[in-house]
Image: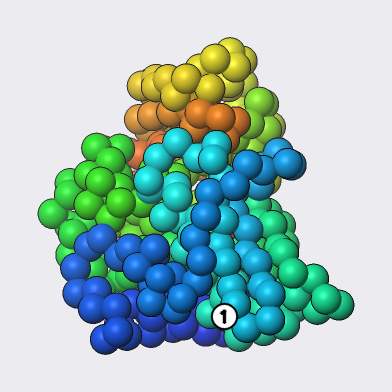
Amino acid sequence: MISKLRQQQVTRCAEDVVCDPDYGFSSFPVDPLIIAKKKEILLNPFKPTKPGILGVLMKQGDQFGIGYSTAIENDGLIHFTVAHELGHYFLPGHVDALFKNGNQCHMSKSGFVSDDPVEREADLFAATLLMPQGLFLPALRRAGSGFSAIEKMATLCRTSITATAIRFAEFSEDPCIVVVSSGSEINFCCFSRAIRELRNVSWPKAGDSLPISAATSRFNQLKENVERGMRRESTSTLSDWVEGAPGLELNEDVIGLGQYGKTLTVLFANEALDDDDEQDEDRDDGYRPSWER
């Protein structure tokens, strides 16, 4: 779990890097490769020897290097992976923690699937670095709604579709759920504020089973759907995913994430939740945003 204070520290650190005049980022895209080169960090692709490893941060003396997996199939995921490793480089305490006892190499499972707070902090750093709020919000308002807006933002920011979807849900004013899954299991999920404010519901979490009735569950039954990056459009209800929630109809867009072996699902509504279904702001319903869990 990451405390709210630590979240603020991580976010501020990433925003300070974006605003550093040495890099000159005043519009999208924020290119982490430029940052790495400015810091004289060596960049190299590598062939991972363990499943799920996307990036590596190396240290020898005062010299650092970042590696990104040759299995990565798009620039957006390369950018997120490099930004994640930059998180380890920039965030206070990470270098000391990761390279103690003479260690010279740290391999990362980035992409919001690790339970390790250090990895979650690096994911938060990466998302903030690549999609800083000051640039992201104005662009998001122009992008529209739903999955098409996420795709537009991913193209504009040159970010992975997963990271963009999560950032979209964080700032969306409409009901939205983002789920990363593999097989029949949920690996990660987050919710827009409109859904977080629901009362008396049971929140899905990592390790839970996908709803049997959902298109995602059927999609994941065929491995080739995931590996080939296939897509499906369907509908679900909010109550399918959040126990105790109203039966609001949701669009369910599903896309396989290729050799990464996971599936991204974006659920969003074209109508607002009724006020009676929303959570009072001062009520603690037990839900914690993804960064805090």
Question: Residue 152 placed where, x, y %?
Answer: 22, 44
- From the image, which quarter does the N terminus lie in? bottom right
Residue drawn at x 65%, y 52% as measured from the top left: 109
Question: Residue 71 placed where, x, y %?
Answer: 55, 37
Foreground pick, 33 / 199: 33
Foreground pick, 119 / 106: 106
Task: Tell me the quarter of the picture where residue 118 sits.
Answer: bottom right
- From the image, which quarter does the C terminus lie in? bottom right
Q: Secondary structure at mark 1?
A: loop
Foreground pick, 234 / 9: 9
Task: Give the residue type at disc 1.
Answer: Leu
In the orientation shown, which residue stands out farthest toward the right? 101
Is residue 7 visible to the viewer in this orientation of the structure?
no
* Residue indicated by mark 1: 91
Question: Residue 180 placed where, x, y %?
Answer: 55, 40
Is residue 181 visible to the viewer in this orientation of the structure?
yes
With 107 as the anchor, is 218 left or right in this view? left
Residue drawn at x 33%, y 63% as measured from the top left: 31
Foreground pick, 42 / 134: 42
Circle 1 Cα neighbour tier, 10 Å, few/some/many (<14 / 14–19 / ≥20) = some
**Above or below 56: residue 174:** above
